[in-house]
Amino acid sequence: MFPIRFNRWTIAAISVAMLGVSGPLSAQTPERPADTSPQFPTSHDLKSLTMSGSYLAARHASVERDAASAAEFYRSALRTDPKNTELLDRAFISSVADGDIDEAVKLADRILTVDKSNRVARLVVGVRDLKLKKYASAQANINQSVRGPITDLVATLLSGWAAYGAGDSKQAVANIDKLAGPEWYPLFKDLHAAMILELSGKEKDAGVRLERAYKLDDSMLRIADDYARWLSRNKDEAAATAVYEAFEKKIPRHPLVLEGLRETKAGKKLPPLVDSPQTGAAEALYGIGATLTRRGGEDLALVYLQLALYLAPNHPLALLALADLHESVKKPQLAIKIYERVPASSPLKRNAQIQLATDLDASDRSDEAIKILKSVIADDPKDLEAIMALGNVERGRKKFADCSDTYSRAIDVLPDPNDKNNTVYYYYRGICEERSHQWPKAEADMRKALELQPDQPHVLNYLGYSWIDQGTNLDEGMKMIKRAVDQRPDDGYIVDSLGWAYYRIGNYDDAVKNLERAIDLKPEDPTINDHLGDAYWRIGRKLEAKFQWAHARDLKPEPDDLPKIEAKIQNGLPDDAPAAATADKQDDSSSADPAGKKKEDGKGG
């Protein structure tokens, strides 16, 4: 993959560059005849071509968020043109984004020789110094990296940890306390001041800070966890357990909280969250980086998370946050590499394995995903999240008999089968049963899902359409689909189901009306285009029908549907409408597969 990208972009760059070179080489003065001898690029020209190719390849890799390739191509271009400050800066940022902080530090040192005020370079060099325990130098560089609310807070916290490393915990806390800013500053200020005080042996003062932070936000994991740990050492098991249990009620089954509960109930006195200036600084970078990830600041979050992992390579929460960031920008392959780094000893390993499997499936490595999920379930046969993930992978890969069995395993271990939140288990099992030709079971599960949530639009759509498709419960089925459309009027798949239901009962005018609306909502869906072509044909708009079928063909339909669409383009539909409805049902699998149902079978269902 790497050489292909390089070759494709380098060739394109050379072609463009050669067009530029050929002009001057062939330009003639009026006094001299044209020189028809072969012209060859000079060494300077070749050097420019190499640099241009690497630069364009790097830009493309950056757009694709392939930081590793971007960094390599920028460094390649930089070797050709070492004084180019733009290349230097881009190579530096790409190296940070890739997590190659050792290389980024080398580039940052070069940047600072020509631009002493480069704030990101100062931050990276400061973090390097902090890791190497060069605390005075770390403070000097970090303090020059500030420029706004986020960076001011990061610099202050990191500088505080450097001051603590230098042996001045009093000054470290004082500097943190002096920082003024937005209303969310105190959470981070109190947490990190408390952590510094804990490591300095000032447990009482640390407790005051932790209690204050906890009262400000008792749903922030790191505050609740460190406060419970402090209580386990300085008060009693009951107080620590109460904090963990309160968090458990807000966010159930968090692995770190469950581990804390187990250990406090066993009478253990839990250590602080961090044990050194390096892990403290990593905690600051992780905390703010993870917050930025949730607030749309992916680029800066990436810098902070990579620096956190430079200081604490096995920080499980930072690893999960970084993987989540890669997922948010649709890069599952990068997320996979990060999830694989989560230590086996971490309570978060199980979570990482489930997400790893999801990303493997998204990368068309479903066999590996299934193997991982089965291993997780073998360790805990009641792990509903893992069972659900396995069922979803199997359903997305059309292993309908398998996913029916998997969802049954989930239903068998539900704590409360009548909880309305369990609708999804019966719904998904019903899909798998219907697709594996077990309609009576599927119908029962769909009815159970509606018993739990009577107005769930996807269940209404699926069951209603299935009845109409089978020619039973027509009135009730149509009412169900209309109720689904009323709730999801902008869902192209559900609107398509209504249009196709009208088609099934022979109401072609209303079919066209709704299918045209579905096309407006989902213009690139091959099944909806195919459906509209069929409806057009039935009302005599045959030229438009063939256009829609041709469009459906070009949108890459399911392999089984393609020859049927091509046959309709060639021959149209049978002229006899009643016979046609039967023929459609027997011969056109897309007709028996409304887009609304098909969507729920897919990986995103």
Image (tube, rainbow, N blue to C red):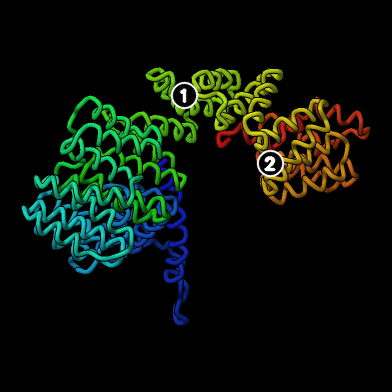
Quadrant of the drawing holding the N terminus: top left
How many numbered discs, if any? 2
In this figure, which residue is indicated by the disc labeled 1?
A: 370
Q: Evaluate whether residue 341 shows in this view.
A: no
Which quadrant, please, contains the C terminus?
A: top right
Tell me: residue 299, above or below residue 414. below
User: Residue at 71% of width from left, 35% of height from top?
Assistant: 461
From the viewer's perspective, is the residue at label 1 or at label 2 nearer?
Answer: 2
Identify the residue at the far right of this view.
576
Cα gap from disc 1 to disc 2, whole angstroms: 28 Å
Classed neighbour count for the residue bearing mark 2: other residues with Cα under 10 Å, few (<14), some (14–19), many (≥20): many
Amino acid residing under circle 2:
Tyr
The three-letter code of the residue at mark 1 reads Ile
The residue where tag 2 is placed is 493
Farthest-out residue, bottom: 31
Q: Secondary structure at mark 2?
A: helix
